[in-house]
Amino acid sequence: MKALLAAAAVAATIASATAAQASGNFVSGNSWMADCISPDVAKQVGCYMFACGVADGLVQAEGRLKDARTVCMSENVIATQLVEVGVAWIRSHPADRHQAAANILTIAWWKAWPCQPDHDDGRRS
C-alpha cells in the first residue's frame, strides 16, 4: 500500500510539475511548504521528491562548475535534512515564500552548507 501511495505521489508530482512548466508557472515556497506540512502523505512525498530533485540538479550543475560551487553539502545529508532546512528558512523568511521554491531551497542550503575557499587560487570545495 505504501509503495502504491508513493508511486501515486510521484506521478502526481511529475504531472503537476509538467503542467506548471508548460504554463510558465513555478512551484512557490508557499505551495512547497504547504505540501511539506500537510497531513496528506502523498503531498509530503511530493515535498521530499521536489527537494531531492532540486538537490540533485544543484549537485549536477555545480559538479560541472567546480570553481563556482555555492553549496557544499556532505554526502551524508539526507532528504529529511534538505526539507527541514528549507522549511526552517521559509519560516524565518516569510516575505520570500512567494518566490520559486527551488531558489529558496538553494539559498537555504547555501546558508546551511556553504563552500569554503581552500585553494590558493580561490576555488571552493
Image: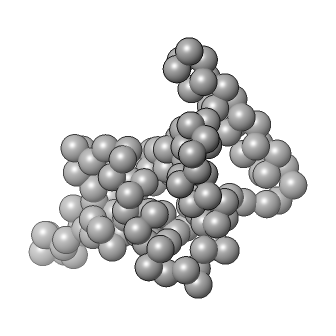
Most extreme residue toward the right is 23
Residue for point 79% across, 60% down: 25
Above-or-below relation of 50 to 125: above
Q: Is residue 28 left or right of residue 112?
A: right
Give the x, y percent position of residue 84: 38, 58
Front residue of 110 and 81: 81
Q: Quadrant of residue 44?
A: top right
One can see residue 96 in this view = yes
One can see residue 63 in this view = no
Residue for point 82% across, 59% down: 24
Give the x, y percent position of residue 89: 43, 72
Residue for point 66% across, 26% down: 8
Above-or-below relation of 100 to 7: below
Front residue of 34 and 104: 34
Instruction: For the C terminus, give its image quadrant.
Output: bottom left
Colour theme: one colour
Give the x, y percent position of residue 100: 63, 67
Give the x, y percent position of residue 116: 19, 71
Instruction: For the N terminus, give its image quadrant.
Output: top right
Q: Is residue 38 left or right of residue 108?
A: right
Report the number of discs.
0
Above-or-below relation of 101 to 41: below
Most extreme residue toward the front is 39
Q: Is residue 119 left or right of residue 92?
A: left
Residue for point 38% across, 53% down: 82
Front residue of 119 and 116: 116
Q: Is residue 16 left or right of residue 28?
A: right
